[in-house]
Amino acid sequence: MNAPVRVTLKLATSLDARIALASGESKWITGPEARDAVHHLRADHDVVLTGVGTILADDPLMTARPGGEPAARQPLRAVLDTHLRTPPGCALLTQGPAVLFHGDDVPASAVKALEAAGARCVERRAGPSGVDIVEVLEWFASESSSSVLVEAGGRVAASAIRARVVDRIEWFRAPVLLGGDGLPAMAALGLETLGAAPMFRRTDTSACGADIRETWERA
């Protein structure tokens, strides 16, 4: 049996838990100290996992660059991309291979184009909310990865919380309010009772430049 994978969810939000304006503008909510701390988190994990929405919106590298320099050990970069919408020319694929998890209904031409660009395309079971994150974590375990940092939008964050796979939350809060029309850090969880809400306990709070960093562990 494969060893369990420990999952950390990173959130970078306003004080009212928004990750972007309604227009999608989000650069930069948190300050340079918080962003550098995130690079250290990436370097400390085996895998950095995001969603295709983040790739399309921000075109990130997803590499670990603490202090502005590439870390000696880079995490595996992976994307939940049910319909293989990742562009072959995206920044992600200019920095070495990345793994794209997709469903079973993607055209062979999309797989071929992305593999030619350096991606590793892995088919996993997909449901109405996208690729099954539990199956993805099982694949990481089979590849000897023991720690995953989830850096994504509200939909992927909610998927991880709903699946009860998040062990720790690293939450960076900026001293700004974006209001109810901003994009939430987490999509709907479909809870019917408060008793069903996932619980976490705060284990650390510290200043991170002008921002606040909180660490929460699953209760």
Image (tube, helix red, strand yellow):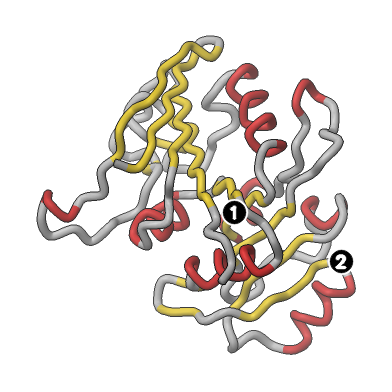
| Label 2 sits on residue | 118
| Label 1 sits on residue | 50
Q: Nearer the viewer, residue 42 or 22?
A: 42
**Which amino acid lies under the numbered mark 1 shown in the image of this protein?**
Thr
Q: CA distance from mark 1 to mark 2?
A: 17 Å
Q: Mark 2: give few (<14), some (14-19) or many (20+) Cα within 10 Å.
A: some
Q: Position of residue 10 (x, y in %)?
A: 51, 39
**Which amino acid lies under the numbered mark 2 shown in the image of this protein?**
Gly
Q: Mark 1: give few (<14), some (14-19) or many (20+) Cα within 10 Å.
A: many
Q: Residue at x 75, y 89 (%)?
A: 108
Q: Nearer the viewer, residue 139 or 9?
A: 139
Whether 111 is drawn above or below 176: the answer is: below
The label shown at residue 9 is: none
Q: Position of residue 113 (x, y in %)?
A: 83, 77
Mark 1: secondary structure: strand
Q: Is residue 81 left or right of residue 171?
A: right
